[in-house]
Image: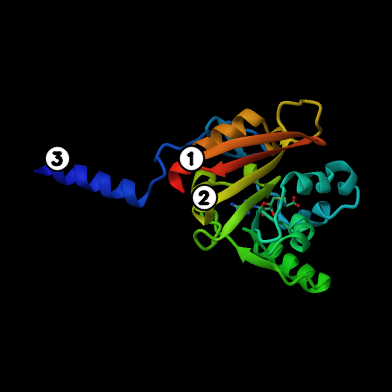
């Protein structure tokens, strides 16, 4: 009897909290740029504070990161609803907005959302909607987006598994996920190691939430663009 109660309690809890309890490990001995929390062997990086907003808008960025190459690689449709998750100042949101139906500019820092809202008014771009997320949810309606884009952001998510589950729930049945990360394979790229990701690691972490790898575009300057689709089994 007692065994049955415990078993049904465990079953109920696993339905309410689908994330595995041991998804994360904590180590006192860790990289100073990290938070001491590890997911699938990777230490999670510290969040780039809103004080760095000016760096996101720096003028050499156009030459360094070639954002247009990323946007071309996304194969956007004019009917698309895109969520730019970890949008920061909206560097990508505002470049994508003229090409699509709507962009959600999602960020966890209220100060970033304030900047994004200010720039939206300044640029008179009406189809960008700022959304304040939590660290476990993008706060997007279910089945509402065609594409979730994360540029230089995913490696900072402190609950990556919960966020990706929330993002896949927000995807339409044929929705896609695109990640742009500095290439972790290349030691000569002058970016702090925890702010880079290898292609292999990105694919492992996306497959862990049921996403299916579609392609990698490796010619985006020092970054790679990885595209995933929602698992057919989940759609
Ligand atoms: C390095 S910035 C990149 C901003 C933007 N994607 C760009 O390329 O200009 C990373 C952004 O991710 C945001 N971020 C970090 N963790 C997040 C989370 N769990 N949910 C949403 N945004 C997050 C940070 O607040 C920051 O604005």
Q: Quadrant of the N terminus?
A: top left
Q: Tell me if mark 2 has few (under 14), some (14-19) or many (20+) residues whose alpha carbon lies within 10 angstroms of its own.
A: many
Q: Residue at x 60, y 55 (%)?
A: 146
Labels 3 and 1: the sequence-earlier one: 3
- Along the viewing direction, whichever of 101 and 170 lies nearer the viewer: 101
Tag 1–tag 2 contact (CB < 8 Å): yes
Q: Does mark 1 have its CB less than 8 Å from ligand 1?
A: no
Residue 152 located left or right of residue 144: right
> At numbered mark 2, what does the secondary structure look like: helix, strand or loop?
helix
Across and down, in percent, residue 78 comes to 71, 60
Tell me, yes or no, if residue 28 can be seen here: no
Across and down, in percent, residue 11 comes to 26, 45
> At numbered mark 1, what does the secondary structure look like: helix, strand or loop?
loop
Residue picked out by circle 1? 210
Mark pair 1, 2: CA separation: 9 Å
Residue picked out by circle 2? 168
């Amino acid at each position: 009897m007692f065994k049955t109660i415990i078993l049904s309690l465990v079953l109920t809890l696993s339905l309410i909290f689908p994330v595995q309890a041991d998804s994360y490990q904590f180590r006192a001995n860790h990289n100073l740029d990290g938070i001491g929390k590890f997911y699938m062997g990777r230490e999670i990086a510290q969040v780039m504070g809103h004080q760095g907003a000016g760096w996101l808008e720096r003028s050499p960025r156009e030459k360094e990161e070639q954002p247009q190459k990323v946007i071309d690689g996304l194969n956007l449709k004019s009917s698309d609803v895109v969520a730019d998750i970890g949008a920061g100042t909206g560097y990508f949101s505002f470049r994508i907005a003229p090409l699509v139906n709507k962009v959600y500019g999602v960020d966890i820092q209220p100060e970033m959302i304030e900047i994004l809202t200010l720039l939206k008014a300044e640029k008179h771009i009406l189809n960008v909607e700022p959304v304040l997320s939590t660290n476990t949810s993008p706060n997007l309606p279910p089945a509402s987006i065609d594409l979730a884009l994360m540029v230089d952001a995913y490696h900072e998510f402190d609950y990556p598994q919960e966020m990706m589950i929330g993002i896949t729930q927000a995807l339409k049945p044929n929705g896609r996920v695109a990640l742009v990360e500095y290439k972790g394979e290349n030691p000569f790229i002058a970016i702090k190691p925890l702010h880079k990701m290898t292609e292999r690691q990105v694919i492992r972490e996306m497959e862990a939430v049921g996403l299916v790898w579609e392609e990698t575009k490796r010619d985006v300057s020092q970054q790679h663009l990885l595209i995933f689709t929602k698992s057919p089994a989940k759609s």
